Image: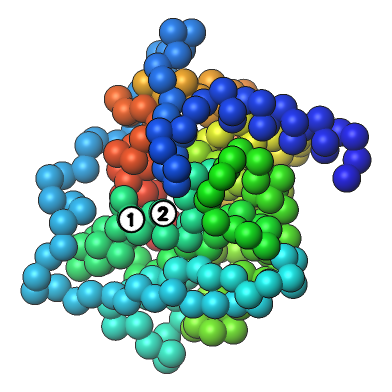
Amino acid sequence: MNRTAMIRISCVISMLTAMGLTALGQEPRIERDRSIELGPDDKAAFAEPPAGFDVPRDGIPHGKLEMIEYESKTVGTTRNMQVYTPPGYSKDKKYPVLYLMHGIGGDETEWQRFAHPEILLDNLIADGKAVPMIVVMPNGRAQENDRAEGDVFASAPAFAKFEGDLLNDVIPAIEKRYSTLADPKHRALAGLSMGGGQTFNFGLSNLDTFAWLGAFSAAPNTQSPEELVPDSRTAKKQLELLMISCGNQDGLIRISQKMHRYLLENDVPHIWHVDENGHDATHWKNSLYHFVQQIFQ
């Protein structure tokens, strides 16, 4: 690892440690930062989701949620990831895939625990508001002990290492096991907090792999916009959608604001959504609800 990378990781860990944790295995608690400054365009792009959007419904088809194993050459172990297949999934049809990343205090079960993507997708697909898709929830902590235990901030380097696992192990395993549309226009990447930073870092650096990106409350692991989008013309050509969201009570909003303003200055189309929430599960669940309705359309 070169000196620049070591300095970057050290800075990330220092900033993340300053957040504090609510409890073991939960996402960091971000207090309202008195220095938050909102601009005139820091406002909601979407209305609040309707009541009951995350409640299981009878009388509609339901997809399947399963935990699977895959061999990770990057980590050198057998790892787990959770996979949602849509109602009526069939090997006779090919599906787009959303890779959905968790935060620093979570694992492959985090999204399912508080947001239930399987319920959101079942309801939206039944209403014709979302395309039937496969949703993959891997563990973004690429190390042998990938549990969110002990000092979770110490695993920050493993979140950076996950880029190799995602590209070289996770995606090939999914495309071998499931009937997928294996091209950038049918792959999406999204995540919350640390996973939002991964989405920026891995997605914008690999637009030949992902054309749809969603970063929700991105954490300080996010690389600078100048590094990630050095050529706005290429980004505009290859991106189908980039959605950036954050709550106006979130002490990390400056990270998302910086990316939004850089993209705005460089004429890179994107959705900028700022709601009334903080660094919390409500914002992430609502953002996922909006994002899955935009992708693969």
Compared to residue 35, the image places residue 16 above or below, namely: below
Residue type at the position of mark 1: Arg
Residue 223: numbered disc: none
Please rate how many residues cluster around mark 1, counting C-alpha atoms within 10 Å: few if below 14, some from 14 to 19, many from 20: few
Say if residue 214 shows up in the picture. no
For label 1, the residue is 113
Compared to residue 203, the image places residue 217 above or below, namely: above
Say if residue 220 shows up in the picture. yes
The picture quadrant where one finds residue 167 is bottom right
For numbered disc 2, what is the local secondary structure?
helix
The foreground one among 234 and 190 is 190
Q: Residue at (8%, 74%) from the top-left corner? A: 59
For numbered disc 1, what is the local secondary structure?
helix
Task: Work out which quarter of the rendered image holds the C terminus and state it.
Answer: bottom left
The foreground one among 218 and 96 is 218
Q: Is residue 23 left or right of residue 260?
A: left
The foreground one among 249 and 264 is 249
In this view, which residue lies farthest toward the left?
59
Residue 287 position in % (x across, y down) = 36, 43
Residue 110: numbered disc: 2
Compared to residue 107, the image places residue 39 above or below, namely: above
Residue 126 position in % (x across, y down) = 20, 68
Contact between labelled residues 2 and 1, with CB atoms less than 8 Å apart: yes
